[in-house]
Amino acid sequence: MHFPALLLTALASIGGVRGGIDYAFSREAWITSPGAPQFRMQELKTTANWEYIDCGLDTDMVQLESFRISPDPPVPGQNLTVNVVGIAREPIKNGAYADVTVKLGLVKLPPKRFDVCEEAKNAKAEIQCPVEPGRYEVEQTVTLPKEIPPAKFVVTVRGYGAEDQDMLCLDLVADFRLGKVQA
């Protein structure tokens, strides 16, 4: 399984991220209803105009522990390194996939489906499918585009196992409307 490949694909597709992963505060809310699985929504706000939200269930195949970027803040036209730590609760097999959707302001771009194992293979990631249960730390680097339009970007990543079971839920929000990103 290759978390950063999915996240970096999403980040690269929106033209990068402004603001840093400086954990200003953390809030975790548990939402339950009778007979329903427990829903965990962990929102990790950051400074500047950037945040990520772990919207997964406590029963998801993957549980995120941390999400860091470097440099902080990112610089358009330069490399961005994403470091993600997560726990695979179940084996991740060939056939696992992620649906990534990007909204640019009010415009929703066509969603893209990525084969998680194929992305890891193509990126020559050190972790390849099948991934056994356990704790993993993965780091990946991409070059951000120089041009970043002044708009709010919302990226949704929904990952699924080979049998369509919930694997991961992550929302990324970057708002470039409030200031100009300097290269």
Image: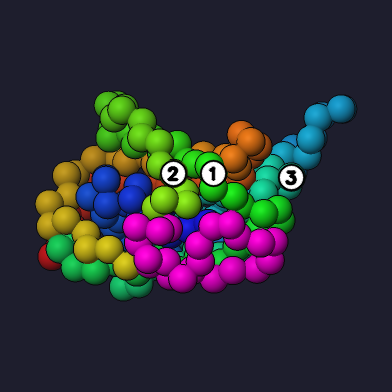
Q: Are marks 3 and 2 in contact (CB under 8 Å)?
A: no
* Left or right: where 56 falls relative to 83: right
Per the image, label 3 sits on a secondary structure element best described as loop
The x, y position of residue 23, in whole percent, is 51, 66
Task: Identify the magenta region.
Answer: 120-140
The x, y position of residue 146, in whole percent, is 12, 57
Residue that badge 3 annotates: 59
Residue at screen point 19% across, 68% down: 78
The x, y position of residue 20, in whole percent, is 37, 65
Residue that badge 1 annotates: 96
Sequence-earlier tag: 3 or 2: 3
What's the amino acid at mark 2?
Asp
Residue at screen point 68% across, 66% down: 134
Q: Are marks 1 and 2 in contact (CB under 8 Å)?
A: yes
Residue that badge 2 annotates: 115
> Considering depth in this image, is 53 or 46 the residue closer to the camera?
53
CA gap, disc 1 and disc 3: 16 Å
Q: Magenta stretch containing residue 85, yes or no? A: no
Q: Nearer the viewer, mark 1 or mark 3?
A: 1
Mark 3 crowdedness (10 Å alpha carbons): few <14, some 14-19, many ≥20: some
> Which quarter of the rendering shows the C terminus?
bottom left
Mark 2 crowdedness (10 Å alpha carbons): few <14, some 14-19, many ≥20: some
Q: Quadrant of residue 163?
A: top right
Residue at screen point 54% across, 57% down: 129
Sequence-earlier tag: 1 or 3: 3
Residue 108 seen in the current view: yes
Residue 64 seen in the current view: no
What's the amino acid at mark 3?
Thr
